[in-house]
């Protein structure tokens, strides 16, 4: 199981969540942040600090955003497990679903 970032993060990228993650597994794309499903240790620290409630435990993702589980997982398909977001910095891409969204705000 893992935590998942969903639609409210798109074009906001508040980033408060990054400071809470003890394993540095929240990676920055162009338009949102993504949680690495294999590096996340399910501690739950990130969930309450997001000001727009974009983060949920995998089993609790609101129905309208359920697709974002795959969005987070598939974002890392060609990246593997970098072992820390701070060492890779901003990643110049988004999942295709996110890239195709109209501006969110
Ligand atoms: Fe996004 Fe919320 Fe983190 S808006 S960057 S998931 S604090
Ligand atoms: Fe990191 Fe814990 Fe969230 S490992 S992504 S702060 S659930």
Image (spheres, rainbow, N blue to C red):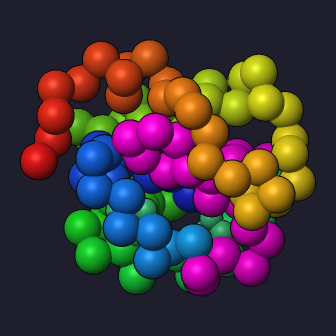
Q: Is residue 60 above or below residue 80?
A: below
Residue furthest out toward the left: 105
Depth order, front residue of 60/5? 5
Q: Is residue 59 visible?
A: no
- Residue at 24% x, 67% y: name it: 52
Q: Is residue 51 left or right of residue 17?
A: left
Residue 32 in picture, x, y percent from top left = 42, 46
Residue 83 located within the stretch drawn in magenta: no
Residue 24 included in the magenta stretch of the image:
yes
Q: Is residue 27 left or right of residue 101?
A: right
Residue 72 to residue 35: above or below: above
The image shows a total of numbered marks equal to 0
Please name the residue shown 88% across and 54% down the image. 83
Q: Main secondary structure of the magenta part?
A: loop
Is residue 68 rendered to the left or right of residue 27? left
Foreground residue among 88 and 24:
88
- What residue is rendered at 79% in x and 30% in y? 79
- Confirm whether residue 105 shows in the render: yes
- Residue 46: % across, % down: 52, 75
Whole-percent x, y for residue 45 in the image: 57, 81
Task: Specify the segment rendered in magenta.
Answer: 19-38
Regarding ligand 2, which quadrant of the image does it lie in? bottom right
The correct choice, above or below, for 70 with respect to 23 in the image is: above
> Which of the pair 85/74 is nearer the observer?
85
Where residue 105 appears, as percent x and y from the top left, is 11, 48
Q: Is residue 6 left or right of residue 59?
A: left
Please give the name of the residue rendered at 62% of the width and 59% of the height, measured from the top-left corner.
26
* Residue 42 quadrant: bottom right
């Amino acid at each position: 199981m893992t935590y998942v970032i969903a639609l409210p993060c798109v074009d906001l990228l508040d980033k408060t969540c990054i400071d809470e993650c003890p394993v540095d597994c929240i990676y920055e794309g162009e338009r949102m942040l993504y949680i690495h499903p294999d590096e996340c240790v399910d501690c739950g620290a990130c969930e309450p600090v997001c000001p727009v409630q974009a983060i949920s435990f995998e089993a609790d993702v609101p129905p309208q955003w359920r697709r974002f589980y795959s969005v987070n997982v598939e974002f890392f398909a060609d990246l593997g497990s970098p072992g820390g977001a701070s060492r890779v910095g901003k990643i110049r891409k988004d999942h295709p679903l996110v890239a195709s969204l109209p501006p969110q705000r």
